[in-house]
Image (cartoon, rainbow, N blue to C red):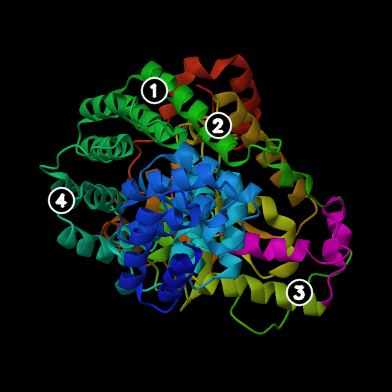
């Protein structure tokens, strides 16, 4: 019996799989209680895609001999293929108790945790698997999927870089297309989906995901055509995704009531809190478009509650972080060293386009990007990466920001600037002056002043109540507002904190700032844009006033929740929208916002 088993193993290792499988079948016939033989035969079933045949063999083998580590791993993989996630998790836990290690275990256990919604343990397992086999396609896809769940899109894109779709199986190509879409690699994703739909015409999932991508690219009619005649998918997740895509298309086609009904009907199927949050946010937009403020606010309460659950499922073992905790980093006095106006190597210092989120920075970004002498970096965290690198320096203290910044030697300043431009070049190689549009960079003023002393600032303001309402209505993502904007009260408090920080820091930090109000820009765009361009020492160009045409024809996405609005001509439709929701603000919220409204020249009427 043992000799027959060793012979079968030797044949397998020698690549003679058919002969090895024949011996394994014979072994099971003559020794049905020999656990290693049962486990070996199950391995061949798994190789043939027969998880249903492999599972009972493995379960029987492990009842006979529970210390077979590889059998536990294979059982976990069989259960994954059979979509029995609970059993898969249990199998991999048993493998761990038996001392399992290596990529096969780490990958399988990580995938099982992802399927169960255990995002934190999945990340710990998959990062280890990736460290061991960074070139393995299945490992790269799994780790990138995990990173996407944590909204680490740039990191996921790096993991996927160079992965050849032609070397992948059909299911792996599906996974790659979805991940590339999440990472903003739109042209790559479009090509992958086109191929998948041709190769798998019966599979609804690629068509649904393609429709979501096309809508995100403002190609709404094409998205509708992709979904035309598509039968409902069998899975709950598929039905929820189809409903979300269909609802977005219906709303943007002028049918908000239909859109709300589609999203509402999918809620029982959308068990994942992140998906449920998306459906509720969609309903809020639908009700707002219909003018039903009460229904919109009700939907937003549910949307943010689900977003909080999704947030907590990804960080279950840590206390929720303080909202905007980095605002504690601030200068307490003027710089102790003269700012180096510099003759540094490299491109000119950027223009930083900032404002509280939903102030209209995307509209202004489109106008600036239409100028031949400017290139816009659209909401990429290049500066944040640079700052994180600085904060890892020996002796750095956030609580002593003055000393930390003033004490930077020239070489460290040069390195930080190089880090910034390296990140920029991952997304864009500017031909003209760079405009870095990242609204909350306004809370990084001391860093910019020290590292980019020749930078210009464009600060866009909007009525505080319109800002607060619009932020509360958006699905910013788990890392960008799940907590800060979950109620009108918390959003108003966030607004007040950010504005207080900015104005307090302006007392200490030198900066060239041009301030523009959104309401003024949309009411007299030529006048105010010309003044802004004068601040930048550039002439205004006619194309800037027709930037919505360029936005509509753009092949890559606009990285902001207002992507559907910037393809419209400049209009005043969003001015004063908060007044329809005044009753839901409450006296305390209005009292917190009123000083800022008065300061910026607005009324509360």
Q: Quadrant of residue 79?
A: top left
Q: CA distance from mark 1 to mark 2?
A: 18 Å
Residues shaded magenta: 381-409
Side of 224 relative to 480 (left or right): left
The stretch drawn in magenta includes residue 393: yes
- Say the numbered circle drawn on residue 155: none
Please say if the residues under marks 2 and 4 sit with CB atoms less than 8 Å apart.
no
Side of 236 relative to 479 (left or right): left
Please say if the residues under marks 4 and 1 sit with CB atoms less than 8 Å apart.
no
Q: CA distance from mark 3 to mark 1?
A: 48 Å
- Say the numbered circle drawn on residue 308: 2
- Say the numbered circle drawn on residue 202: 4
Q: Earlier in the sequence, mark 4 or mark 1?
A: 4
- In this orientation, does residue 477 appear? no
Q: CA distance from mark 2 to mark 4?
A: 36 Å
Q: For mark 4, does the 10 Å Cα neighbourhood hold few (<14), some (14 to 19), or many (20 or more) residues?
A: few
Q: Earlier in the sequence, mark 2 or mark 4?
A: 4
Q: Earlier in the sequence, mark 1 or mark 2?
A: 1
Q: Earlier in the sequence, mark 4 or mark 3?
A: 4
Q: Earlier in the sequence, mark 3 or mark 1?
A: 1
In the rendered image, which residue does mark 1 sit on?
A: 296
Please say if the residues under marks 1 and 2 sit with CB atoms less than 8 Å apart.
no
Q: For mark 2, does the 10 Å Cα neighbourhood hold few (<14), some (14 to 19), or many (20 or more) residues?
A: some
- Say the numbered circle drawn on residue 413: 3
Tell us which disc is closer to us: 3 or 2: 2
Image location of residue 556, percent across then percent down: 34, 62
Tell us which disc is closer to us: 1 or 2: 2
Give above or below for 71 relative to 93.
Answer: below
């Amino acid at each position: 019996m043992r000799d027959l088993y060793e012979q079968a193993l030797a044949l397998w290792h020698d690549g003679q799989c058919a002969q090895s499988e024949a011996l394994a079948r014979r072994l099971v016939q003559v020794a049905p209680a020999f656990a290693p033989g049962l486990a070996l035969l199950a391995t061949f079933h798994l190789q043939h895609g027969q998880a249903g045949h492999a599972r009972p063999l493995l379960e029987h083998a492990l009842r006979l001999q529970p210390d077979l580590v590889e059998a536990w791993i294979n059982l976990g993989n069989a259960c994954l293929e059979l979509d029995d996630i609970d059993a898969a998790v249990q199998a991999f836990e048993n493998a761990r108790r038996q001392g399992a290690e290596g990529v096969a275990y780490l990958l399988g256990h990580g995938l099982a945790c992802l399927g169960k919604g255990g995002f934190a343990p999945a990340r710990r397992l998959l990062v280890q698997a990736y460290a061991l086999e960074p070139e393995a396609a299945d490992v790269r896809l799994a780790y990138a999927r995990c990173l996407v769940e944590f909204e680490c899109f740039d990191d996921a894109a790096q993991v996927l870089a160079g992965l050849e779709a032609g070397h992948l199986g059909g299911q792996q190509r599906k996974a790659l297309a979805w991940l590339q879409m999440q990472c903003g690699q739109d042209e790559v994703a479009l090509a992958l989906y086109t191929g998948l739909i041709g190769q798998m015409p019966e599979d609804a999932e690629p068509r649904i995901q393609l429709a979501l991508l096309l809508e995100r690219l403002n190609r709404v009619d094409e998205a509708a055509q992709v979904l035309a005649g598509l039968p409902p998918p069998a899975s709950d997740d598929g039905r929820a995704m189809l409903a979300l895509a269909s609802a977005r298309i219906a709303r943007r086609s002028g049918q908000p009531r239909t859109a709300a009904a589609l999203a509402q009907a999918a809620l029982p199927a959308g068990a994942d809190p992140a998906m449920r949050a998306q459906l509720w946010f969609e309903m809020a937009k639908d009700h707002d478009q219909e003018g039903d403020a009460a229904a919109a606010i009700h939907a937003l309460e549910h949307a943010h509650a689900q977003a909080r659950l999704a947030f907590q499922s990804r960080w279950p073992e840590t206390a929720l972080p303080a909202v905007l905790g980095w605002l504690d980093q601030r200068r307490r006095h003027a710089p102790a060293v003269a700012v180096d106006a510099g003759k540094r190597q490299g491109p000119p210092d950027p223009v930083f386009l900032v404002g509280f989120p939903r102030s209209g920075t995307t509209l202004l970004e489109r106008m600036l990007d239409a100028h031949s002498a400017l290139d816009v970096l659209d909401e990429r965290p290049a500066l944040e990466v640079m700052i994180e690198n600085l904060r890892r320096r020996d002796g750095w203290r956030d609580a002593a920001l003055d000393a930390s910044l003033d004490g930077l030697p020239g070489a460290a300043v040069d390195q930080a600037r190089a880090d910034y431009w390296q990140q920029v070049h991952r997304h864009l190689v500017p031909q003209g002056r760079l405009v870095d549009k990242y609204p909350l960079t306004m809370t990084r003023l001391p860093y910019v002043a020290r590292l980019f002393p020749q930078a210009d600032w464009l600060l866009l303001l909007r009525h505080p109540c319109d800002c607060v309402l619009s932020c509360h209505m958006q699905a910013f993502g788990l890392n960008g507002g799940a907590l800060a904007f979950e109620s009108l009260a918390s959003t108003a408090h966030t607004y007040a904190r950010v504005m207080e920080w900015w104005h307090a820091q302006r007392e200490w930090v030198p900066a060239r700032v041009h301030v523009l109000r959104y309401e003024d820009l949309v009411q007299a765009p030529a006048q105010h844009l010309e003044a802004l361009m004068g601040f930048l020492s550039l002439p205004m160009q006619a194309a800037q006033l027709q930037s919505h045409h360029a936005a509509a024809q753009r092949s890559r996405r606009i990285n902001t929740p207002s992507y559907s609005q910037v393809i419209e001509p400049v209009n005043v439709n969003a001015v004063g929208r908060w007044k329809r929701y005044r009753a839901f603000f409450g006296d305390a919220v209005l009292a917190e916002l009123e000083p800022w409204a008065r300061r910026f020249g607005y009324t509360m009427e």
